[in-house]
Amino acid sequence: MMLGYSTMGAPELSLDQCGALAAEFGLDFLELRALEGSIDLPRLFKERAPIPTQIPLRILGSSLRLTEASSADAKAFYGYAELAHRLHIPYLRVFGGGRVEDGLSSGQLAHAAECVDRVRSEMRDRRWNVEILLETHDAFSLPQACLDLNGLLSEPLNLLWDSHHTWRYGRETPAETWEKIGPLVRHVHYKDSVMEGLQLRHVLPGKGKFPHAALFDLLHTQDYLGGVSLEWEKLWHPEMPSLRDALRDFVRIAGRANTASVPVSNES
């Protein structure tokens, strides 16, 4: 099992700085979502040659939502697909869209399936060697929604398992979710939270209610060899503690050895 973090945890940093931070904590990869204050990464790299990094780049996060994507949305998505290919990133994340509380109509699922077919066809035509992963997010926090969409596709749409969302919004244990979608999981997101009244608050790894021991025990038991990203949402919630604090707790609860050598600093 490989460990890494999403760059949304330090959105002000450059790619080199993110790579150096990952190396400092003994991590295996980066997940790209934001850099240098921007989430428009195709535009950020438009005038740049591919940049070698000391840490492999494993996944790139787009904002495409399958159930509501327009032709313009798909066209914007191709910028991410081209960038992932250019930077040799194997996985490209998409969202499904919709809301857990509303469920998904047959029309929404059909629209999502058509969008997947269309972008896959375009990516094949352009020979972009990248695989799309659907995140268990929005209405697709319910594993059955992911399976329903797959039932409309001619080839499987593998998943980025946001383990927090299937637990918090899908109300399932990690084991219950894995039993349904385990064969489709290629990447995992981890984060922790507590509820304060009706308000969700993200907290440092291991400090909330998420069953992290159950998750990591499950992944070890299943001989999972993919990646697990710390998704520290400082991009959206700048008041959160520093990424360094979060990474220190993340490598500890994930069972990565010798975290005592990691510097104790409050800088991001």
Image (tube, rainbow, N blue to C red):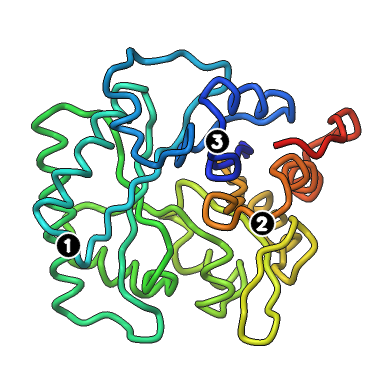
Residue 139 in picture, x, y percent from top left: 37, 74
- Residue at 36%, 78% in the rendered image: 99
User: In the displayed structure, does residue 265 sit left or right of residue 212?
Assistant: right
Image quadrant holding the C terminus, namely top right
Kind of residue at badge 1: Ala
Under tag 3, what secondary structure?
A: loop
Instruction: Kindly identify which residue carries mark 2.
Output: 239
Q: Decide which of 168, 36 is in the foreground and name it.
A: 36
Instruction: Kindly identify which residue carries mark 1.
Output: 113
Q: Please report contact status of discs 3 and 1: CB closer than 8 Å, yes or no.
A: no
Q: Residue furthest right?
A: 260
Quarter of image, res 245:
top right
Under tag 2, what secondary structure?
A: loop
Question: Looking at the image, is 151 positioned above or below residue 106?
Answer: above
- Residue at 51%, 59% in the rendered image: 162
Under tag 1, what secondary structure?
A: helix
Tell me if mark 1 has few (under 14), some (14-19) or many (20+) residues whose alpha carbon lies within 10 angstroms of its own. many
C-alpha separation, residue under disc 3 versus residue under disc 1: 35 Å
Question: Looking at the image, is 63 positioned above or below residue 131?
Answer: below
Quarter of image, res 75:
top left
Instruction: Kindly identify which residue carries mark 3.
Output: 12
User: In the displayed structure, does residue 67 sit left or right of residue 51?
Assistant: left
